[in-house]
Image (cartoon, rainbow, N blue to C red):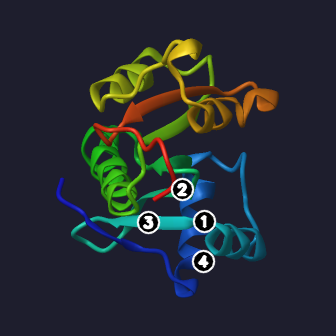
Amino acid sequence: MKVTIRRARPADVDEICELVRRATRGRLVPSRDEVFDRMAERGMLLAFSPARQLVGLISWRVENLVARILDFLVHPLDLRPTVGRQLVEAVEEEARRLECEACVLYVSPEMSSEALAFYIGLGYTRWPEESLSEPWREAAHEFDAFGRVALIKQIRAERVTRPI
């Protein structure tokens, strides 16, 4: 399915709340203020079906030339291979524009084999600790306390060794 991807706007808050509620079967019901605060502190892209229904979202922030994918949600789940791919690729494109070296996403170690295959298919993998530069290492460990695992994709062939 080809979707329309665009930046989230304050007018989208109610629709985002509803997507999260539907996708989590009511386990998460964010308030309007929570969603608005998330939008203010990070970049957020939304995916809309041809019928203009919100079917996915992804958020990220950039620090030290590393883009961190923080929220990723596609509903219904069977759209992940198409809509999910388009959302992740859109963030990677934004990260390239910002001259990032890598994108990092944080996943649960108990994720499904289908989810892991999806991320690997997009080029994300665990990197040996000793091969990570300091900014990459910091990003990889950012969510350790929450039991998350970092999957990394290098998006810039040459690493930056001095400030740009």
Q: Nearer the viewer, mark 4 or mark 2?
A: 2
Q: Amino acid at mark 3?
A: Leu
Q: Amino acid at mark 2?
A: Trp
Mark 4 touches mark 2? (CB < 8 Å): no
**Label at residue 42:** 1
Q: Position of residue 141 (x, y in %)?
A: 70, 29
Q: Amino acid at mark 4?
A: Val
Q: Residue at x 34, y 41 (%)?
A: 80
Above-or-below relation of 73 to 5: above
Q: Position of residue 143 (x, y in %)?
A: 72, 35
Q: Earlier in the sequence, mark 2 or mark 1?
A: 1
**Label at residue 45:** 3
The residues tagged by marks 2 and 3 sit, at their Cα atoms, a distance apart of: 9 Å
Q: Earlier in the sequence, mark 4 or mark 2?
A: 4
Q: Dot 3: what SS? A: strand
Residue 108 visible at all: yes
Circle 4 residue: 13
Q: Residue at x 25, y 72 (%)?
A: 51
Q: Amino acid at mark 1?
A: Arg
The residues tagged by marks 1 and 3 sit, at their Cα atoms, a distance apart of: 10 Å
Q: Earlier in the sequence, mark 4 or mark 1?
A: 4
